Amino acid sequence: MLYEYDGGVDAALPDLVVFPNSRAELQFVVETAFRHGLPLVPRGAGTGLSGGAIARHGGILVTLNRMRSILELDYANQRARIEPGVVNLELSNAAAPAGYYFVPDPSSQQACTIGGNVAENSGGPHTLAYGVTVNHVTGLEAILPDGRWITAGGAALDTAGPDITGLLTGSEGTLAIVASITVKLTRRPEAARTLLAIYDSIEAAAVSVSAVTAAGMVPAALEMLDGFTLRAVEDYIHAGYPRDSAAVLLIELEGMEEEVEPGMHAVRRLCLGAGAREVQLARDAEQRQRLWKGRKHAFGAAGRIAPSLYVMDGVIPRTRIAELLRAADEIARRYEIKLGNIFHAGDGNLHPLVFFDQRQPGELERAVAASREIIAACVAAGGSISGEHGIGMEKDLLMPLIFSEDDLDFMRRIRTVFNPQGRLNPGKLLPEFRACRETMNSWQRSAPAAMPEPLSVAPIA
């Protein structure tokens, strides 16, 4: 029963859970499942938020977190080769003495595995300037559902032939099971500055996001917390967020000292010009760590508000943040649910938090319905249904909102090349044709009204 769920709200019981310790044991499991025609579902730490690691149709759940060796740290070529069960933060800690780290940093980085990061193409606060997981993976070794091995990419920056590494990254375990990963290691920056911009309105914070990016500034991270959420975080973490504010932006700049210092002053000027009441600079490493601890532990703090939490993952243009947050609040009021917001504002990746009590009849259904309406509003604003959490079994029926039936058919054909019998992680990512049509017709009947025009961003002296 411990393996019937992940970090989302869906659940399904596997028939069997196995824990391979090596490549040979993994191959035995895969070949056994293939020989008996059983569904096979790969799983990392189970921290995913879209049901990607749930055995939707039963079968064998193969848990890879015992394959957790760091096989090679090649600092001269800035590469590491690891097994899929290596925890994200463990790789950075291992490379830290040589001055390197692994950039993608999901909020669950203390627990999530890099194999899971590859499956979902995970992001994180510091991927705004550096890119998400696919931008840091150069090679994969994977096993196909019939037990054959394939190698894609390698340690080189680029290799001949189609980009199979890019294709497998983000495929949510529906094409192959990754057994080893070659990733880039990045030199730790010479200097870093963390700013906390404080606002009396969400609109002013949203305008600041657009102002910073429109000015050509690319911070390493640009995160937003609304007042409701930051107060919960402050009660739990005591990070130093002002409890009387409507929103804060957590902004980090990294690089050489000569560029970070003037960049910090430019960002502060832009935020104040856009309506920030104050912009604080973390005075030392301890305060900087405390501010980021508040952001990284926000989901844990949410448990102080309600016993259940549904974390969404939509994407919108940065210029539409304020409008979308207003639309989400209206949807939450209509469904009579509590809603908080903490998200990657710099790349428009929203993570509305729906608070509810799953023990109360009807609350889960209301939370899911409201969440789907918010995701549809993201699409209406020119965005997408997922930025980093993946589709899984949570949003497969929402794929027709952004893809045509021909698009989805083409994706199925690609899946069939790798997974012809459809037994590897079945019921994930791609809906069936009939479900596509029914969902599309339903959403066309109840689609949200077009989003209002974006806030204008005036030039700031």
Image: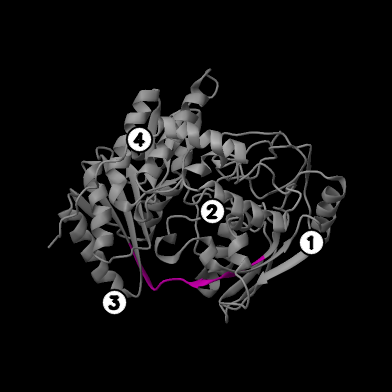
Task: State which mark lies toward you, 4 or 3.
Answer: 4
Residue 302 falls within the magenta-colored stretch = no
Q: Nearer the viewer, residue 92 or 354?
A: 354
Q: Residues within 10 Å of mark 2 (few under 14, many from 20)?
A: some
Q: Main secondary structure of the magenta part?
A: strand
Q: The magenta stretch spans which residues?
A: 181-193
* Crowding at mark 1 (Cα within 10 Å: few <14, some 14-19, many 20+): some
**Nearer the observer, 236 or 438:** 438
Q: Dot 2 lies on which element? A: loop
Q: Give the residue at x 56% y 58%.
A: 89
* Badge 2 or badge 1: first in the primary sequence: 1
Q: Is residue 458 visible?
A: yes
**Mark 2 vs 3, N-terminal side:** 2
* Mark 1, residue position: 23
Q: Amino acid at mark 3?
A: Glu
Residue behind mark 4: 328
Vertical placement of residue 408 versus 245, above or below: below
- Residue 60, image x and y in percent? 78, 43
Its colouring scheme is one colour
Eye-nearest disc, 1 or 4: 4
Observer-nearest of 235 and 344: 344
Residue lying at 83% horizontally and 45% vertically, measured from the top left: 37
Q: CA distance from mark 2 to mark 3?
A: 30 Å
Please tell me whether residue 183 belongs to the stretch shown in magenta.
yes
Residue drawn at x 22%, y 59% is 268
The label shown at residue 415 is none
What kind of residue is marked 4? Answer: Ala
